[in-house]
Image: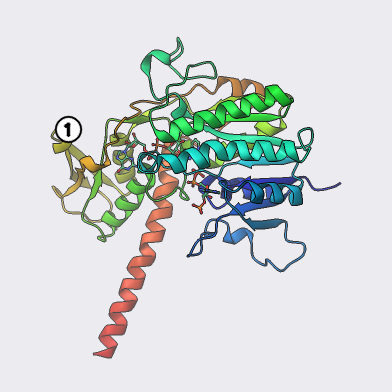
Amino acid sequence: MKNKVALITGITGQDGSYLAELLLEKGYIVHGIKRRSSLFNTDRIDHLYQDPHDPDQRLKLHYGDLTDSMNLTRIIQEAQPDEIYNLGAMSHVAVSFDTPEYVGNVDGLGTLRILEAVRILGLEKKTRIYQASTSELYGGMPENKNERGFYDESSPFYPRSPYGVAKIYGFWITKNYREAYDMFACNGILFNHESPRRGETFVTRKITRAVAKIALGLQEKVYLGNLEAKRDWGHAKDYVRMMWMILQAEKPEDWVIATGVTTTVRDFVRMAFEVVGIQLEFKGEGVDEKAYVKACSNKDYQVEIGKEVLSIDPSYFRPTEVDLLIGDPTKAKEQLGWVPEHDLRDLVQDMMEGDVQLMKKDVDLLKAGHEILKQAE
Ligand code: NAP
Ligand code: F7E
């Protein structure tokens, strides 16, 4: 049987890397678009791309950018994909306030460029399209939750950042092309999902990296912004499985993917420290809130009792914040049979294990450096 062909924009990102793994396991030929950068940017997919000269290599990378229509059209023409997953985006909400025009171009118009290229090439009936929509569309407006207290497929949108506003264009243009041209184009409205491959400046990964470093004596404390914010955090591995399921559904539709549980940033911090046996005590309020070590039960990670390990830096506050997100994945569970394999505790454990291993390499390097210096003396 002929291999199915997929094209992933954003293949070098967290989700793109897990999705590429999944699709290769399923026997797909996977084309990915990577940006040119002055440093290597393929760390997350290098393990999938051992020998680029092997003609049987099923992962094929193309240089490209979502701001370049001609480039996108050429790649789609060459690949003739059965499925396109449009995951490429400037995905950082806080940064979108600094680069609003760029975000509009990439996250909003970029989606249009993909849809229009498929149409121009006459592939509307062949190519199914997944658009990476987001819970940021809801903006956390409390009055827009359903009667059970969740955001679902029928909740109104009220984006609260240039990122959310750009993604709302992506959402509606996808829906419009589905209706106007009868294309199999779907939105996955995904709530936050994390993993050991999460970008280092998103709050979960910033926390797990900092906690690992603090436990190993490599960092004194971490500075965060709004600890009250609540997010519905799932594991990226469970969410990329849903992206594929959405494109295998009978009809093109929009789907909410979430866990249905919401947690504060403060509690995520607590859980991450608990993985390394450290209990915290939070004291103070607002910008004066701090966290101190209350108990330390793991002999491998001895941090002094009473040590201050967290402070607030107001520069991380956003001009407009999304206070609380919680999603209702009932439709995806009932109609597509989605069963997530990870809960928040597993997720924190997985991320902490990844970062402790990573930071231990730094400790080993430091020790090796000291050894060499000692021998040279
Ligand atoms: P990510 O780790 O930030 O990855 C984004 C990817 O997009 C990277 O491969 C990046 O390339 C690429 N990219 C950025 N600008 C581009 C451009 N101008 N042209 C082409 N590619 C570009 O994001 P993620 O967490 O994997 O998220 C995947 C998608 O889902 C994004 O669209 C995001 O907005 C959306 N989403 C994410 C979440 C979440 O919680 N993770 C939730 C809902 C929706 P570089 O590697 O070169 O930077
Ligand atoms: O922030 C608060 C911050 O940057 C989460 C993206 O994948 O999910 C992600 O967007 C919360 C916010 O993710 C810090 O104010 C506190 O309330 O990890 P984040 P996000 O903004 O929710 C959605 C669904 C996407 O679609 C996006 O692409 O944590 N927070 N202190 C902090 N956030 C950061 N980054 N850094 C802090 O120091």
Q: Of all residues shown, which one is farthest toward the top?
A: 147
* Residue 125 location, quadrant: top right
What residue is at 64 percent from the left and 35 percent from the top? 130
For the question of whether residue 276 can be seen, the reply is: yes
Residue 313 spot, x, y in % from top left: 21, 43
> As rendered, which of 179 and 290 lies closer to the eye?
179
Would residue 123 appear left or right of 269 to someone viewing this image?
right
**What colour-coding does the image apply?**
rainbow
Element at label 1: helix
What residue is at 47 percent from the left and 45 percent from the top? 195
> As rendered, which of 271 and 314 lies closer to the eye?
314
Asked if residue 238 is positioned above or below residue 44 in the image, the reply reads above
Would residue 129 appear left or right of 265 to someone viewing this image?
right
> As rendered, which of 278 and 173 lies closer to the eye?
173
Residue 23 spot, x, y in % from top left: 68, 46
Residue 311 spot, x, y in % from top left: 19, 44
What residue is at 72 percent from the left and 29 percent from the top? 183
Residue topped by disc 1: 286
What residue is at 39 percent from the left and 32 percent from the top? 161
* Residue 240 location, quadrant: top right
Asked if residue 268 is positioned above or below residue 159 in the image, the reply reads below
Residue 179 spot, x, y in % from top left: 69, 22
The quadrant of the picture occupied by the C terminus is bottom left
Asked if residue 18 is positioned above or below residue 188 in the image, the reply reads below
For the question of whether residue 91 can be seen, the reply is: no
- Give the amino acid at mark 1: Gly
Label 1 near ligand 2 (CB < 8 Å): no
Would residue 74 appear left or right of 314 to someone viewing this image?
right
- Ligand 2 falls in quadrant: top left
Would residue 366 appear left or right of 32 to someone viewing this image?
left
- Within 10 Å of disc 1 (Cα), the crowding (few <14, some 14-19, many 20+) is few
Count the numbered circles shown. Answer: 1
